[in-house]
Image: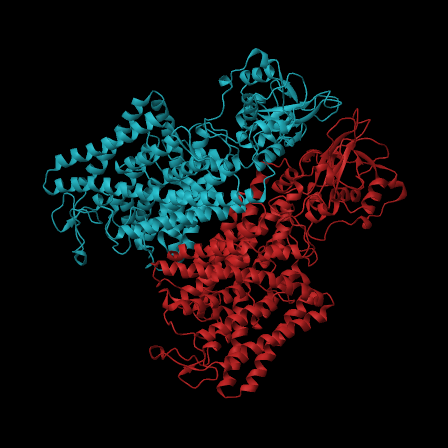
Chain colours: A cyan, B red
Amino acid sequence: WRSRGKLQIFQYQVLKWVLALLVGVVVGLVGFFSNIAVENIAGFKLLLTGDLMLQNRYLAAFELYIGCNAVLAAAAAALCAYVAPAAAGSGIPEVKAYLNGIDAHSILAPSTLLVKILGSVLGVSAGFVLGKEGPMVHTGSCVASLLAQGGSRKYGLTWNWIRYFKNDLDRRDLITCGAAAGVAAAFRAPVGGVLFALEEVTSWWRSALLWRTFSTTAVATMVLHALITYCRGGHCGLFGKGGLIMFDLSSRQATYTATDLAAVVLLAVLGGLLGALFNFLVDRVLRAYSIVNEKGACYKIVLTVTISVITSCCTFGLPWLTACTPCPPELASKCPTIGRSGNFKNFQCPPGQYNALASLFFNTNDDAIRNLFSAGYDREFGVSTLLTFFTTVYTLGLLTYGVAVPSGLFIPVILSGASFGRLAGTLLGSVSGLDPGLFALLGAAAFLGGTMRMTVSVCVILLELTNDLLLLPLIMLVLLIAKTVADCFNKGVYEQIVRMKGLPYLEVHAEPCTRSLVAGDVVSGPLVTFSSVERVGTVVHTLRSTGHNGFPVIEDPPFAPAPELCGLVLRSHLLVLLQGRIFTSDRVKTGAAEVFRRLAPFDFAKAGSGKGIKVDDLDLTEEEMDMYMDLHPITNRSPYTVVENMSLAKAAVLFRGLGLRHMCVLPRTQGRPPVVGILTRHDFMPQYIRGLYPNVLPR
Amino acid sequence: WRSRGKLQIFQYQVLKWVLALLVGVVVGLVGFFSNIAVENIAGFKLLLTGDLMLQNRYLAAFELYIGCNAVLAAAAAALCAYVAPAAAGSGIPEVKAYLNGIDAHSILAPSTLLVKILGSVLGVSAGFVLGKEGPMVHTGSCVASLLAQGGSRKYGLTWNWIRYFKNDLDRRDLITCGAAAGVAAAFRAPVGGVLFALEEVTSWWRSALLWRTFSTTAVATMVLHALITYCRGGHCGLFGKGGLIMFDLSSRQATYTATDLAAVVLLAVLGGLLGALFNFLVDRVLRAYSIVNEKGACYKIVLTVTISVITSCCTFGLPWLTACTPCPPELASKCPTIGRSGNFKNFQCPPGQYNALASLFFNTNDDAIRNLFSAGYDREFGVSTLLTFFTTVYTLGLLTYGVAVPSGLFIPVILSGASFGRLAGTLLGSVSGLDPGLFALLGAAAFLGGTMRMTVSVCVILLELTNDLLLLPLIMLVLLIAKTVADCFNKGVYEQIVRMKGLPYLEVHAEPCTRSLVAGDVVSGPLVTFSSVERVGTVVHTLRSTGHNGFPVIEDPPFAPAPELCGLVLRSHLLVLLQGRIFTSDRVKTGAAEVFRRLAPFDFAKAGSGKGIKVDDLDLTEEEMDMYMDLHPITNRSPYTVVENMSLAKAAVLFRGLGLRHMCVLPRTQGRPPVVGILTRHDFMPQYIRGLYPNVLPR
């Protein structure tokens, strides 16, 4: 199926574009609807509570609040625990691992998609300190995967015309587009989405992909834009200014003095330190939680509800400790906001006053961020308010990630960064003339740089959120410093999670220990090869007894004068050939014509996750087991090879650079078998190498 | 030198960062000074002419104008023709080719750098329809190359501590940073610079590079920002609002109707068509000019001056054909601008009126673009004015690129695109409610998409220039349509120039004709190999008689039981060993210890362009010629290899993907020499393959 006609190539190109744009449309729609759902559920909950507060029925309000949160949290946790455990957490590490070539089970399954969307809506509405941005990336990838597979056979939704895309390359491309569209839909940041996919998610990048992801994110953003414009007309329930964080800071000054710069540098260093600390603590919390979570689904739900209760107590209880602030007289019409969402929450205060801490806690996370970034009212939040909020959010953010709910890390990090930045800005007010709202933005940038270690994409996302390019130099400076500081301590939070999950992630740089080894050193275990025309029984037995996915095929006499390497055959292709029962009673070549007369090329296309043929499903008679099958038509005649004395580091560069799954190792000297081994992803993992050669090089 | 200590690695890292930031600082400074120079020279010229015009001495004004332009043009052409011919043209195709692995001579030499800066300033001041943006990219790359080489030995500027970076990888990284910084300094667009480097310039991209280029562009932009802030105080002569195009369109509306969208789509389609036509015509003009330019330096200067005179006649003559327009009464203080640069040029008109065409022609290109983008005064430019300007600029842009002056393509394309867009906007004014200034911006986007075929980077550059992210959806739509339309006809303008110059550029996708061939098919000519301990005379003779840069080394008996491949040795390393005279009288291994006792590892580091040892410089006695040299210490023991029956397309993917220069081809069957050939970049060129196999596959 490599020699397709022009029409087919054209059809393929058009389909690929249509799919990419379709991914954009669907992700845009999903982003919009999950937003509306959150705004309405959370808004309704806050309104009800607020009404009870106005009637001075504080205990009832608290019960209602904590109850709503716990029920929503339990529902989200139950979905995650029983339906799709893969939907818990951010999902970005999993997508990152998938695009690195790790086909982990059920990560992009339709059930995961459904639970991710619903669980994320429920989780955010439950008032947890978590975001829906990370889950949106996972959702986008799931949507793309589903479309690329041509629907799900399990649920009876299949489109045959998409079987063109049943290969790794096209699927990876589309999933990259989906991840980019997820960011674009979450932040309304199309360029930021592309850069996020480039910087954080993908392991391979082609310039054609830049254009394709860009169009996908563009479509997603346009769909979102159109729907939001429609909602501005008041057709979408409680949907206010839009749950998508978006602040217009264009009134900010663009000049700054040397002391301003010093203050910003200090902020960036502290942000980097706190970000690195966050990563360290998240790792510990995740390890602790995983012990609880492994005990069963019930434990997961109990843990989630516990955290929900703690969160509710903090957000409802802490504002009582704050004194009421009189409203600024010039804002009498807006302050306090009673019976609707807004900047100045009345809470327990008498009319004409507002509770600053409640304005932050007693809101959706998006609104809290918008409040922190707001400029102009310098004294809106006092030092104690900000300090309380920062500590609480930082701690709750740590405790929340890891419970069995789809939970993004962007929002907790932005929230704590912004409150920290605003705190610093308020404290440094006498030294620096910059606005506390600008400090909040820079604080968020510092925390993002310190935890996620992304630079360009975070910078662009923040720019797209704030719509002011004059802030660019300051944001860049903060990001660079924070990342540099944090890199001295540990790795980025997503890489850390990938590593903690034990996924065999191939790093860009080969491990130092591979430098002093050669490829032949790590080839181990008995090598299983097939002859180019092999007995059916041998093939079936081998497939049953080993878990390998690729087997070298040796051309033996009489087909060649001496044994030589014919190529590499994949387990999935062998299974298709076995199922097709294309056997001969003698040891002769069948030829490709015979195979493709009986089987269509698409039968060999890569099946969707968990949908391939199993070797145990085959039902072959004793007679058939003694027949022969010709492997020539399904053998890849040009596998990538290395000589056994090739430096392992260079072999790793080749393996990673071309995105291979199998690599044949050839002998160096003549007169030996034509292939000495096969290298797979696991052979390059540092744990494996260190297991073989404990003393090769200390870390 | 692969086993460096921790301290050295740290030193290397710090140095690499310092260099990257230094590149940013230098490029920022260069960008600023070339800007100031242009503003002052061109401004002075225009002021003098304007003064004469005010005195009604029109002929004298014309003589002065045409004379100034011709002298400036001749100076620029003379510099290019006599000092550094490589400095002519945009420079982006050359940088692109260099980063693809083509070490063309003198492209990044110090003389090229100097001529590029000076010539660009002179050329832009001479009033040509060309930009300084493309040359800035080349300048940035030259600066980076110069710093990476540790100065120039020819001019006595060398720093020994930078010899760490004398290898291809580090040099490519730094040059990528330089190119990105060039765009950043030219447009004040740091993110756009990074994306430009990613999308258009580099062939290999690592995610570490993203961060590094980003910091370089950030530094360049900050330097520029600081200096411009200083200049705002009036310390920089005629430096006005800054020659760097920057317009604030934030007053634009963000809503648009379906008819607006239809108008925009039409604009994008036409822009794509005209862009493709531009590419086609540029190719023809370049071919015609190259005949003239090849005749000698004088011809180059004559051609340049001819084009300069034509340009001067157009820009001075055409405004006379336009009727004067009365100034809008509300702008009496600003219109007409007399005796200074500004929006409404008085030209031949009586006081209180202005000449619309002169406002575009009789300005620097940057000011003309700013005028075209200006919003608010809908009727500022009439249809006939815009049509005249568009046709003239489109034609002059075509004629100017290719003369022996550093000339960027951004400005001509933006100029014609903006005038075309404003023309379309004025014509469609009854249908669409969008501002003509916005149409001008979209027209520029359409032309950029149609000629350069960049999407994300152009989009971001335009956003950074306009500082309004609400325009994003429209710009993206226009870019996508224009690129798609233009891609139906031909390739992007830079790729076209690379191809026209005959540079062996490796495309991302393997040529279709390589699919039906195997690696062994294109290996041709007698293979030259060395024995692992070889006679000095043989080595010298081989180096003299062939031009190859890499030679396989064969381990012969008695060092191995049978001949086997030892590795690959480079010409430059052989020359170092020959110059070091590390010979033995018998055929024995010297060992690496002996070699590195006499030669430092840095002696083998890659020399700067044109600075390596020549084989004719060696002065070896007859006696020495009969001695032996041990090639083991300088042999690369792990060359990348393919088996001879590997598909050529897959070999090309490997070659391109890992950025190789040589690849050994191994025999498939045993009992033959251990290596059957070497593949280099030229073996993958479609011209070469089609020369060998004319009937392999029609294009």
The foreground one among B242 and A595 is: A595
The foreground one among A239 and B192 is: A239
Quadrant location, the N terminus of chain A: top right
Residue that extends furthest to the top in the rendered view of this protein: A622
The foreground one among B204 and B376 is: B376
Residue that extends furthest to the right in the rendered view of this protein: B622
> Quick check: can you spot residue A459?
no
- Indicate the quadrant where residue B310 lies: bottom right
> Quick check: can you spot residue B270?
yes
**x and y, in percent, of residue A479 in the image:** 43, 47
Residue that extends furthest to the front in the rendered view of this protein: A597
Q: Is residue A346 above or below residue B335?
A: above
In the displayed structure image, the side of residue B155 where residue A570 appears, left or right: left
Q: Is residue A238 above or below residue B246?
A: above
- Indicate the quadrant where residue A287 lies: top left
Q: Which residue is at 25% across, 34% downward? A: A311
In the displayed structure image, the side of residue A111 where residue A527 appears, left or right: right
**x and y, in percent, of residue A561 in the image:** 76, 23
In the displayed structure image, the side of residue B381 where residue B696 appears, left or right: right
In the displayed structure image, the side of residue B256 where residue B145 appears, left or right: right
Circle count: 0
Quadrant location, the C terminus of chain A: top right
**x and y, in percent, of residue A187 in the image:** 36, 46
**x and y, in percent, of residue B48 in the image:** 53, 81
